[in-house]
Image (cartoon, helix red, strand yellow):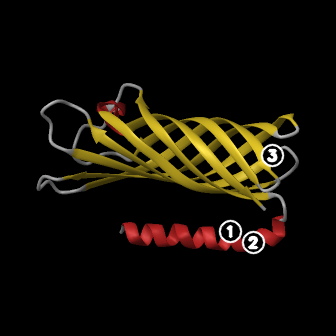
Amino acid sequence: MYRTFFKIIISIFIVISSCQNLYSQKSNISFHLGYPFTTGNSFFSFYDGKINTGLSYSYLLSKKFCLKFSLDYGRFNFDIRNSPDVNANLYKIRSCIGYNYHLIKRLKLLTEVGLGYSLLNYSSKLNIQDNNENGINILSGLGLFYNFHKNYELGLSLKYDYTYLEKPEVYSNISYNREINTTVIEIIFAHLF
C-alpha cells in the first residue's frame, strides 16, 4: 500500500518537474527537514516528535502569490513510561497558496495556507497489528527565505498543521480521538528554476 502511495507521489513530482519550461524562472523544488512538536489536547499529545521531512514544488501565479504542492513525512514515538514501543508515521500530501513579501532584495517572507490528505500509520515491535487512519489536514505557515545564489534559497519556517481523522471504528467518536495538532520548525533548501 505504501509503495503504491509513494509511486503515485513520485510520478506527480516527475510530471510537475517536466513542466518547468511552462513556468521558466518561476518555479522551485525544495527539501525541508524539521522537528515536530505535538500540541493540543488529544490522544496524539502522548507522542513525541522525532523528525519531519518532505519535498515540495511551487510556482509563481503572480509576482506575489505562489501555488505549492508538497509531500511530508513525520515520525513520532509513543512517550509514556513502561508503554509498548509504538511508532506513528504521518504522511501528508497537500496543496498550498503562498504570499511572498520581499523585505529586501535577497530576503523574503512567505506566508502560506494549505489543505490536504493525511495517512497515519501505527507500527510496533510487538505482535500488534499495524493500524492505519486517514483524514484531512489544514496547514498555516510562516517562513523566512534568503536567496544566497541566483538559483538557490535557504529558509527557516514555522508551521502549524491540524489533521482531523475519519470517524474511528474501534473507539469512541469524540474530537479527542480524531485530532492531531503539530507545530513544526524546519530548515528549507530550495532550488529555483
Mark 1: few/some/many CA within 10 Å (<14, 14-19, 20+): few
- Quadrant in the picture for the N terminus: bottom left
**Going by the image, does 157 lie left or right of 87?**
right
Dot 2 amino acid type: Cys
SS of the residue at dot 1?
helix
Mark 2: few/some/many CA within 10 Å (<14, 14-19, 20+): few
- How far is disc 1 from disc 3 in space, using C-alphas? 18 Å
How far from the left and from the top, in percent, is residue 147?
Answer: 78, 45
Q: Which mark is residue 46?
A: none
- How far is disc 1 from disc 2 in space, using C-alphas? 5 Å
Residue at (17% x, 57% y) in the render? 129
**Residue assigned mark 1:** 16
**Going by the image, does 120 lie left or right of 105?**
left
Label 2 vs 3, first from the N-terminus: 2
- Quadrant in the picture for the C terminus: bottom right
How far from the left and from the top, in percent, is residue 75?
Answer: 37, 47
**Residue assigned mark 3:** 65
Dot 1 amino acid type: Ile
Residue at (53% x, 67% y) in the render? 9
Q: Say if mark 1 contacts mark 2, CB within 8 Å.
A: yes
* Quadrant of the rendered image containing residue 20: bottom right
SS of the residue at dot 3?
strand
Label total for image: 3
SS of the residue at dot 2?
loop
How far from the left and from the top, in percent, is residue 140?
Answer: 61, 36
Dot 3 amino acid type: Phe
The single residue placed furthest to the front in the displayed view is 149
How far from the left and from the top, in percent, is residue 45?
Answer: 34, 30
Label 1 vs 3, first from the N-terminus: 1
